[in-house]
Structure formats: structure tokens, C-alpha cells
Amino acid sequence: MANTVKNQKEILQKLKIEKLNAMQEEAQYQIHAQSEVILLSPTGTGKTLAFLLPLIAELNSDMQGVQALILVPSRELAIQIDNVIREIGSGFKSNAVYGGRSFSKDKINLKHSPAILVGTPGRVADHIRRRTFETESIEMLVLDEFDKSLEVGFEDEMRDIIGSLPSIKKKILTSATFNVSIPKFVGINDVFEINYLTDESPKLSLKVVNSPMKDKLESLGELLNKLGNQPGIIFCNFKDSIDRVSEYLNDIDINHACFYGGMEQKDREQALIRFRNSSHQLLLSTDLAARGIDVPEIKFIIHYHLPTRLNEFTHRNGRTARMHSDGTAYILKYKDEYLPEFIDKLNPHIISIEDIESVDNKEDNEWTTIFVSGGRRDKIS
């Protein structure tokens, strides 16, 4: 087995983590010991650190070029993982590449090859086609939330990328979903499975709130008034719906941030920063926020629209009741609307808004987030 990361205690202190959990401990050992590992664990349990620590320990400080490639389904997850690598302070360079930012900026960063490259499949495949960096030196491949990358249409890019990596010695796959199918092009032959998924979420309370009107906006406002100034996410299925709900929330003076795929990357990043900083307690989002992004512990989520599949429903709910915390998922539906069978089987509690106990913290947050734009040479005085 390769040496463990030097000063691991110091690394955990930097990350403000007292100790690794059981999943992270097992992952660290097995990733060193095995050449193919799939790590299955719920959202919010620390999968990123679970694969980063052993991956960094395998890096060779005398070797030039990219040694490890981490593919992720979203820009936000790429940025998040790159930030964690930098916080670890291993001495190895990392870079994140993703759509929505300047390709020329990527090229400048990749002139001096990082040891770890994190990116979305579309942008990484583009770099490989243009030979911005060499792939022969890459010996470790991580497919983080790989099933999500397939769901959002990156199959062709992932196939091309994996086919262009001739020197891979270690493959690590992660997911928060049961019974995921691994495509043949991944080239998995004898995978070791680390499974920390369970069939039930005892700390999650699932409640159906009936709206007397087909237009659920007023019912949403009443529900939010009951829930008070707690951190939460409202899920909609479409951008147009987000625009409409956002306009209504503005009309009734409820502060919120919006987050969806069509936004400029800068606006998406700023929306998440405001939410993390509690400048906004509510995030109004599509399924983009269901997994793979770093958001704070939240008290509730609201399904303004329901997803069409159980997997998406599960991942949305996974934003609350994370780790050892409690949380509530509310389904807001018209009173005559039928629930999908996959939700009906979960036996949710049917309630009215009047049944919900009001939370006594309705004051606006006194904090705001200020963004200062400038380059490296600019100073604040």
C-alpha cells in the first residue's frame, strides 16, 4: 500500500474535521489496496474527502504532467473539489476546467500541467481533442457522481475520454444511488464495492401539503410563512416556473436566490455563495441543486413540482436530513392531483398548511454578501 497522506491530522484540522467517518476510513484503505473501487454513500457523507486523501497519497512528486483526472457532472462540483484540494494543501497543483468560462484561460493554466485535473466531461473532452494536455501520464481516474454525468448526456464525451487514457492503473467511481449500472466503456473488470447506502432515511419527514387552488403560488407563500426564516430549497422542474415563482416571492418580500442551468456561471456561483453565507435563506432551483454541490445543512425542501423518477426525488430529498440531522421534505400539490406511485409507496403524511406549527423566527437576516471584482494585482484599501 502507498504511504498515507503526510500530516493527515493537520489536514483534518485545516478542514475543521475532528476525524474521518467509517465510510471515509474504509474508502481510504480500499482505494489504496484495490485497482477498481465503486463508493456508494448518501449525499453529504463526505465522499469527496474519502477519495481525495488516498488519491493524493498515490501521487508522485517527481512525475511531470497530469497524474489524476476527476470527472464530475457539474461546474459547481468541479469548483468545489478543486477548492477542497487547495484547502488540503498537499503541495500538488490542481486545476478545474468546465464550460461557461474562457477556454483560453484553461490553456494558460494547463501550460504548467497540474498533478490533478478536475473537470466536466464536455470541457475535458474538448481539451483532449485539442491536445491541450497529454493523457499518457494519467494513471488514476475518478468518475464522481458518474451516473449523474450519464443522465445529463455526457456518455459520448466520457467514452471518448476514457478511450484516450492508455496508462490508467486505478479507477474510482462514486454515486449516491442504489443499483447503478456501469457502462461497458468504463472498462470495469473486478470492482470492489464500498456500500454505505441504506434503504430508509429515518431522519427525513415526508409531508404532502394540499393546495386548494391549482395555482399553488399563494399556498407556497403561506407554507413559507409558517416555516419562517430557515434555510431551505424550493425545487421546480423548469426555468420558466422558477421565473414565475421568483417574481411572486419578490412581490411578497421573501428574499431568495435562483439557481438553474441557463444562468451565467458567475451568477450561479454568486447565488450559491449568498445561500451558503445565509444572505439568502431560500434557494429556488431546478434539479441542478439536487446533488453534487456544496450547500449548507438545510431544514427543509419543497417540491413545487415533482420529478418524474424516484432517483431525482431521492436526490432532492438528500439535500436535507443529512448525516445526523433532521429535515422535512414537503410536496406541494393541488388537492385533486394524484401522487406518482413511487411516492405513494413511501406513505407520506397528508397535511394542510394549518397543521404546520409556525416557526418563530421570521425576521430578515441582517447579513448581506458583497462581491468585489478585481484581479490579483488589485488591492482593497
Image: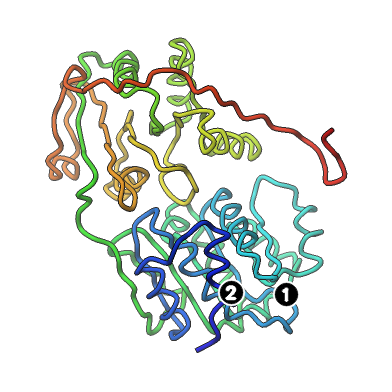
Q: Disc number at residue 370?
A: none
- For marks 2 and 1, the one nearer the N-term is 2
Query: Could you say which is closer to the camera, residue 193 or residue 157?
Result: 193
Q: Quadrant of residue 352?
A: top left
In the image, taking residue 77 as reference, residue 245 lies left or right, namely left
**Dot 2: what SS?**
loop
Closer-to-camera residue (139/226): 226
The answer to whether 176 appears left or right of 246 in the picture is left
Three-letter amino acid code of the residue under disc 1:
Glu
For label 1, the residue is 134
Task: Count neighbours of disc 2 (C-alpha within 10 A) and say few if under 14, some if 14 to 19, many if 20 or more.
Answer: few
Secondary structure beneath label 1:
loop
Query: Dividing the picture into quarters, in which one does residue 361 lie?
Result: top left
Residue contact between numbered discs 2 and 1, judged by CB atoms under 8 Å: no
Inspect the image, locate mark 2, and give the three-letter code of the amino acid beneath it. Answer: Asn
- Dot 1 crowding, Cα within 10 Å, few <14, some 14–19, many 20+: some
Residue lying at 57% horizontally and 81% vertically, measured from the top left: 168
Q: Nearer the viewer, residue 322 or 365?
A: 365
Q: Is residue 13 visible?
A: yes
- Give the x, y percent position of residue 52: 53, 68
